[in-house]
Amino acid sequence: MQQRNLGSQGLTVSAEGLGCMGMSAFYGAFDDAESTVTIHRALDLGITLLDTADVYGPFTNEVLVGKAIAHRRDEVVLATKFGNEIDENGRRTGRVNGRPEYVRAAVEASLQRLDVDVIDLYYQHRVDPNTPIEETFGALGGLVTAGKLRYLGISEAAPETIRRAHATHPLSAVQTEYSLFTRDVEDNGVLATVRELGIGFVPYSPLGRGFLSGRIRNIDDLDRDDFRRSSPRFQGENFTKNLDVLDQVVAIAERKGVTSSQLVLAWVLAQGVDIVPIPGTRRIANLQENIAAKDIALSDGDLAAIDHVAPAGIAAGERYAPGGMRAVHR
């Protein structure tokens, strides 16, 4: 698989990564054995970047990923995250915590759950509004010096926050939602900022949380405990409007002879060589479909046609419920 650089500190990863969140949380029923086989297949096919977080489960996804890579550690660029506060009983508190003492404890706990000596890429998952970003990244930089972390990143941060974090310790990656349905970073300064500073960009949910795959045509296609049932884009009139856009994307994909998932992933990959999307799946068939997107060449005409039917801002509804939106772009 083609390799791409994230940042200018030396981090190189596969052009596509694998998001592991849905293997343990948020998207309904899951099976650890199936997920483990999918991770192994991803490595076989040349994916090196695996993305997890302490809050996925909480904790269980890090354990799953750690066990899956136990005998293949040297093939993996292992990324995890901290910051969505988890209490001593393993429950989310609803707060974000970037205090240095919390940072250090979170790193030690993730190292144990992943059963590794060092984490390759460590993100602040959300920005703590009550702790100066310089304090958080000062602590993280100390952990890089101590050999517990290799590279640093931040997720869902505003341009000025990115600048301040990067000035405290160089960032290799900024992770933010980005897809045909979520193009905020093109207009809010995030993409321009990371490119000015030489930071890599890692889009999560590049398939619009599965909407752009074309497989979800009705809310009842989702499990009862799937968090997307509470997502504004999957509800009521918004759902209907978004299906209309999707159908136009599917039509372009069909003319191209590819699936809609492959088309929208190829579109993300075409936005720049500094971009490494991390589509998530727990199934081998979806994984192999997604990986094939790297071989799809989009002409200027293709890109124009896609932009015509799915311009920035086309998606109906916010990408999170109000509580989730309050935690992004701080």
Image (tube, rainbow, N blue to C red):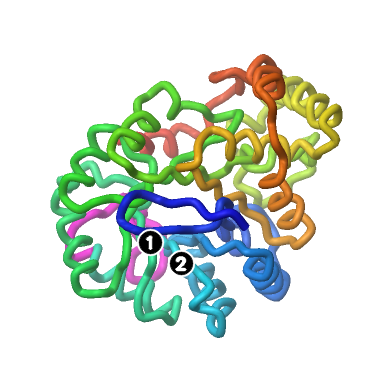
The structure residue drawn at horizontal position 52% and vertical position 36%, both measured from the top left corner, is 178
Amino acid at circle 2? Leu
Residue 79: % across, % down: 44, 62
Distance between mark 1 and mark 2 Cα atoms: 6 Å
Q: Is residue 82 magenta?
A: yes
Label pair 1/2, CB-CB below 8 angstroms: yes
Q: Secondary structure at mark 2?
A: strand
The structure residue drawn at horizontal position 19% and vertical position 54%, both measured from the top left corner, is 136
Q: Is residue 253 magenta?
A: no
Q: Which residues are magenta?
A: 81-102
The structure residue drawn at horizontal position 56% and vertical position 85%, both measured from the top left corner, is 71
Q: Earlier in the sequence, mark 1 or mark 2?
A: 2
Residue 216: % across, % down: 77, 39
Residue underneath mark 1: 121
Residue 150: % across, % down: 31, 66
Q: Which quadrant of the rendered structure holds the C terminus?
A: top left
Q: Is residue 77 left or right of residue 21?
A: left
Pointer 2: residues within 10 angstroms few (<14), some, or many (20+)? many
Pointer 1: residues within 10 angstroms few (<14), some, or many (20+)? many
Q: Is residue 93 left or right of residue 243?
A: left
Residue underneath mark 2: 78
Q: Secondary structure at mark 1?
A: strand
The structure residue drawn at horizontal position 76% and vertical position 51%, both measured from the top left corner, is 289
Residue in the foreground of this view, choosing between 70 and 46: 46
